[in-house]
């Protein structure tokens, strides 16, 4: 068996997606789940980018044992020093150095000639190697780089101590056959390539990130860089779950290749990343979309009932999709509740369990049928890692087709009670204006999304917000059977998130 190393960059390239920013505690929560999922390498961030990034990488390096913890660095000493210091607490650390090798990047972005790029690449890898035994080098924009120059850079950085050579398709320009040829050419033209692992890092600008990664794996790449749900710069990165499930499902095309991913954790990881980043997963998204395992047509349903494999190439439970079967109701007790959470893969401490149970009981009073999806949503709401600086005490809205909506909102902060009233363009707007009056925080609403967690008139509504405050974009979400309440709670969650930045 040959190992395909899964290098997860959700917390670095994924978090570079506009509006996906996570706070420190959220990053740790994602890293913890990535460890449970079984990724081999966690690229935890770009430590030089900001003190917050540095602190998050360091915290992950300190707390997450098992996967290699990697920090990104340009071919600049200060970057490599920061990556070294931030990853130093890790049991196994890696510094990932990148430097562009394409003509367009060298000429316009770096304003450097080939000779200087080669010298910088070599010196940087040597410098980083003195600090850390595990060095990855990426010739940025490799897929648009002149081949002979690319081969030379790769050969020299391997001689200088890089043990992983990552081939990025930085702008998502390549096509599967072309990318496969590039990997083959690298193997045939870089004399010392056997001393390094070939990695691939594909972007999705033309929708081919996964296809390109798979084509490269079939030609011998043995590390795939990817993100949960495919989030990332612009159109995103190759999606981890799609790469893993392709390799697993098409053993005939990927003979003898194995990953260490625990596939049954995929769905939960996807939900967590979606929740914390506020990036909703499209219903038709492969492997983790809400419709990925739903058979609507009668012919398909009939086929699946007779023999699942007629229309199912992946069993939902293989990726941890538990379905939306009716599980609990108003009369379910704490034991049944905690048992079900265990089945869903949650490990809650006593306080979290108690909070979630209270919320479950409140929900069960309003909603007859409680589905797994409801449970996942309320539990994730409860264990959110944002501390409650502002707490919602009460709200009242008046709305109708012939009156201007108004709202009175009552909040608490450190035991102190605040109340404000405002009118607005709608009941949600009125609530938000009343909250703004109380907190005095200026927020610009960029996006408001409402979706039903399950079906039915009493379904839990989940509101996802994207807001801007002081140049920073924040995502927040909340759920309730009352969509105004979900909207208000999501807004307060965003305000509490700002308090933590
Ligand atoms: O897309 C890219 O080229 C990158 C590098 C830093 C590897 O993200
Ligand atoms: Zn990238």
Image (spheres, grey):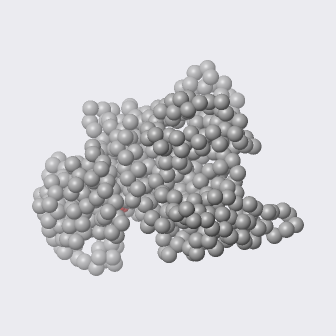
Ligand 1 - quadrant of the structure image = bottom left
Q: Indicate left or right for 221 with 214 as reference.
A: left
Does residue 495 lie above or below 28 as drawn? below
Q: Is residue 450 left or right of residue 20?
A: right
Q: Which quadrant is home to the N terminus?
A: top left
For the question of whether residue 325 can be seen, the reply is no
Give above or below for 219 relative to 399.
above
Which residue corresponds to the image point at 62% horizontal and 50% vertical from the top-left? 479
Residue 464 found in image quarter: bottom right
Residue at far top of view: 306
Give the percent coordinates (x, y) of residue 367: 70, 40
Q: Position of residue 351 (x, y in %)?
A: 47, 43
- Relative to 164, 498 lies left or right: right
Q: Quadrant of the C terminus?
A: bottom left
Please provide percent x and percent y for residue 37. 38, 41
Q: Is residue 115 visible?
A: yes
Q: Is residue 325 positioned above or below 404 on the image?
A: above
x then y, percent, for residue 382: 53, 48
Q: Is residue 19 above or below residue 440?
A: above
Q: Which residue does the image show at 31% across and 54% down from the upper left? A: 60
């Amino acid at each position: 068996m040959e190992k395909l190393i899964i290098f997860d960059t959700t917390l670095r390239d994924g978090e570079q997606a506009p509006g996906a920013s996570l706070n420190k505690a959220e990053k740790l929560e994602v890293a913890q789940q990535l460890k449970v999922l079984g990724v081999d390498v966690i690229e935890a961030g770009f430590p030089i980018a900001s003190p917050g990034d540095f602190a998050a990488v360091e915290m992950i390096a300190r707390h997450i044992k098992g996967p290699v913890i990697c920090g990104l660095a340009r071919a600049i000493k200060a970057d490599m020093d920061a990556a070294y210091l931030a990853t130093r607490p890790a049991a196994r650390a890696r510094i990932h150095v990148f430097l562009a090798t394409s003509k367009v990047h060298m000429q316009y972005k770096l304003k450097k000639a080939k000779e200087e790029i080669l010298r910088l690449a070599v010196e940087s890898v040597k410098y980083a190697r003195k600090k850390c035994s595990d060095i990855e080098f990426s010739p940025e924009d490799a897929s648009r780089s002149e081949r002979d120059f690319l081969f030379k850079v790769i050969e020299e950085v391997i001689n200088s101590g890089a043990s992983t050579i990552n081939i990025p398709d930085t702008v998502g320009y390549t096509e599967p056959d072309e990318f496969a040829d590039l990997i083959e050419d690298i193997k045939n033209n870089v004399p010392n390539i056997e001393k390094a692992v070939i990695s691939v890092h594909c972007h999705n600008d033309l929708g081919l990130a996964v296809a390109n990664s798979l084509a490269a794996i079939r030609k011998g790449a043995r590390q795939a860089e990817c993100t949960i749900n495919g989030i990332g710069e612009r159109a995103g990165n190759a999606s981890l779950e799609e790469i893993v499930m392709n390799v697993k499902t098409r053993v005939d095309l990927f003979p003898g290749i194995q990953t260490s991913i625990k596939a049954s954790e995929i769905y939960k990881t996807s939900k967590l990343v979606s929740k914390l980043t506020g990036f909703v997963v499209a219903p038709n998204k492969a492997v983790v979309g809400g419709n990925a395992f739903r058979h609507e047509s009668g012919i398909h349903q009939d086929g699946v009932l007779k023999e699942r494999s007629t229309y199912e190439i992946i069993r939902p439970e293989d990726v941890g999709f538990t379905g939306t079967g009716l599980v609990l109701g108003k009369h379910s007790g704490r034991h049944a509740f905690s048992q079900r959470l265990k089945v869903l893969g949650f490990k809650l401490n006593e306080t979290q369990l108690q909070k979630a149970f209270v919320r479950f009981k409140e929900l069960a009073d309003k909603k007859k049928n409680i589905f797994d999806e409801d449970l996942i949503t309320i539990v994730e709401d409860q264990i959110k890692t944002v501390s409650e600086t502002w707490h919602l005490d009460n709200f009242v809205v008046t709305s109708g087709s012939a009156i201007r909506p108004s709202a009175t909102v009552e909040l608490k902060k450190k035991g102190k009670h605040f109340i404000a009233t405002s009118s607005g363009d709608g009941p949600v707007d009125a609530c938000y204006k009343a909250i703004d009056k109380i907190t005095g925080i200026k927020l610009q609403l960029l996006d408001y999304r409402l979706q039903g967690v399950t079906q039915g008139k009493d379904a839990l509504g989940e509101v996802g917000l994207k807001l801007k405050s002081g140049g920073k974009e924040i995502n927040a979400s909340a759920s309730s059977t009352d969509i105004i309440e979900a909207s208000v709670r999501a807004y307060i969650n965003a305000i509490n998130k700002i308090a933590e930045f």
